[in-house]
């Protein structure tokens, strides 16, 4: 005879058995895949980024503590980050794969590279992303990169990656299994709204430069008496601060072409001589601001700008030429070609200088004067993306021409015209800022 209590016990026992079976299956499934996250290479941010990666991966597979990895490597007499070390440690700890990483640069210029390796130390997949890594808002980006690399790793280990690559290659261009890491991570980062996904032809929001170089000056005034006043200054040093701005330089629409640039430069303590070899002090100061648009066609960008400029050359009292101050509007065309995307570009620029004023020189040689000029130059530059370090070199020629009218206060000084030209060569180093409106 079976009592009611026996039925209850039977049902409880069956429930416990079912729970144990389900729990055992789940535990067994979780234990099927084991991994380790090795120490990351890089600066002080590397450890904190590794922690985020390890914690995220541990929500997907079983991540063996790194202390266990070190102990196993010590027992085997190997380094855990070498191919031999990975193979021997994986054999002892039953690892299916490992993650390793490297952090280069800091802040906006930081780059995180993640690599997965199989139990023999062979690379399975890798991917990377740029931008800040350690802020609260950056954690989802690091987690997304971890998810993407794991997904690609799983596909490679299971054979799915090669099949998927073959399917893509059949429809589009040739794709390898390793390429899937970049395709996967781009999608994952876009899912979390990452503003730091960069393409090979993307531009930083802002780049600041410090420049050093030299310029000369050759000015000639043709008097109505057929005499000439000539002023020449050999190459003298000049210091400059400049910037370029591409506020939407990573957009995939028409906004990415918006462009602005500005520069300020000065020279002080210059020594000049007049025709009688008398010494007098000289100084220069100039600035310009240009805004415009650059359109991209493959590796080439072409466009135009409109700007305002100011260029002053002050000379102590002399018998040759007074101070000149040119203010002007500057419509320009420019072109640039990416030789090695991000790392190296070359370009050219040409502009008109529509004069708004010429300064004291008009008051000395005439009643009125009209100023017109041009400039043309070539430039090259690039950046070290991981560091945010930018560099540039520019060679430029500038010419101003003034046509005088009316009689000078001193009639014998009345002039017909004046030409004023200079060569400039400037070298720049700077820093890129990627955060902003992207």
Image: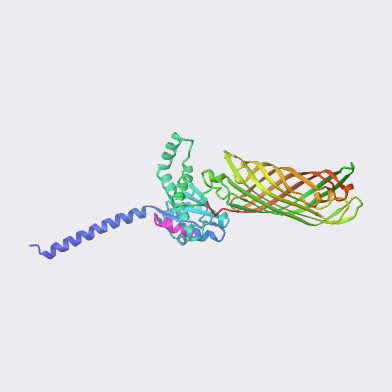
The foreground one among 400 and 179 is 400
The foreground one among 145 and 5 is 145
Q: 373 above or below 207? A: above
Kindly identify the residue that appears in the image at 68 percent across and 41 percent down. Answer: 348
Q: Is residue 362 visible?
A: yes
Q: Residue furthest left?
A: 1
Kindly identify the residue that appears in the image at 56 percent across and 55 percent down. Answer: 108
Report x, y in % for residue 281. Answer: 83, 57
Q: 300 above or below 356? A: above
Image check: 210 left or right of 248? right
- Per the rendered image, the range of residues in magenta is 50-61
Is residue 53 in the magenta section? Answer: yes
Quarter of the image that includes the N terminus: bottom left
Image check: 430 left or right of 52? right
- Residue 36, quarter of picture: bottom left
Is residue 325 in the magenta section? Answer: no
Kindly identify the residue that appears in the image at 44 percent across and 52 percent down. Answer: 192
Q: Main secondary structure of the magenta part?
A: helix
Q: Residue furthest bottom?
A: 5
Q: Is residue 72 visible?
A: no
Image check: 245 left or right of 403? left
Image check: 3 left or right of 236? left
Report x, y in % for residue 325. Answer: 76, 51
Report x, y in % for residue 114. Answer: 50, 51
Report x, y in % for residue 384. Answer: 62, 50
């Amino acid at each position: 005879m079976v009592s009611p209590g026996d039925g209850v016990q039977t049902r409880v026992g069956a429930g416990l058995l079912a729970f144990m079976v389900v729990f055992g299956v789940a535990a067994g499934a979780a234990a099927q895949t084991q991994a380790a996250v090795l120490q990351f290479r890089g600066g002080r941010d590397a450890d904190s980024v590794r922690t985020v990666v390890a914690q995220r991966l541990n929500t997907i597979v079983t991540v063996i503590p790194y202390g266990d990895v070190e102990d196993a490597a010590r027992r085997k007499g190997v380094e855990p980050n070498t191919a031999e070390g990975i193979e021997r440690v994986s054999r002892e700890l039953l690892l299916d794969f490992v993650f390793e990483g490297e952090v280069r640069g800091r802040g906006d210029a930081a780059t995180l590279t993640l690599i997965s390796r199989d139990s023999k130390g062979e690379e399975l997949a890798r991917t990377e992303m740029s931008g800040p890594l350690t802020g609260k808002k950056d954690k989802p980006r690091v987690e997304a990169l971890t998810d993407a690399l794991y997904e690609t790793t799983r596909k490679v280990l299971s054979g799915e990656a090669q099949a998927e690559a073959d399917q893509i290659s059949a429809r589009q261009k040739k794709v390898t299994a390793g390429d899937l890491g970049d395709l996967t991570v781009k999608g994952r980062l876009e899912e979390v709204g990452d503003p730091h996904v960069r393409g090979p032809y993307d531009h930083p929001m802002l780049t600041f430069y410090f420049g050093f170089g030299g310029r000369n000056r050759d000015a000639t005034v043709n008097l109505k008496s057929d005499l000439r006043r000539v002023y020449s200054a050999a190459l003298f040093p000049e210091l400059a601060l400049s910037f370029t701005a591409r506020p939407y330089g990573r957009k995939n629409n028409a906004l990415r072409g918006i462009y602005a640039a500005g520069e300020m430069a000065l020279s002080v303590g210059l020594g000049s001589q007049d025709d009688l070899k008398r010494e007098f002090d000289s100084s220069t100061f100039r600035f310009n601001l240009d805004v415009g648009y650059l359109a991209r066609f493959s590796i080439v960008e072409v466009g135009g700008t409109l700007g305002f400029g100011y260029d002053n050359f002050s000379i102590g009292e002399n018998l040759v030429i007074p101070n000149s101050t040119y203010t002007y509007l500057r419509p320009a065309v420019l072109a640039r070609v990416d030789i090695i995307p991000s790392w190296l570009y070359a370009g050219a620029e040409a502009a008109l200088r529509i004069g708004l004023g010429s300064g004291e020189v008009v008051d000395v040689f005439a009643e009125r004067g009209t100023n017109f000029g041009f400039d043309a130059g070539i430039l090259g530059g690039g950046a070290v993306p991981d560091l945010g370090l930018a560099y540039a070199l520019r060679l430029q020629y500038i010419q101003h021409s003034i046509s005088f009218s009316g009689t000078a206060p001193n009639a014998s000084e009345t002039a017909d015209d004046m030409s004023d030209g200079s060569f400039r060569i400037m070298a720049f180093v700077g820093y890129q800022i990627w955060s902003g409106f992207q």
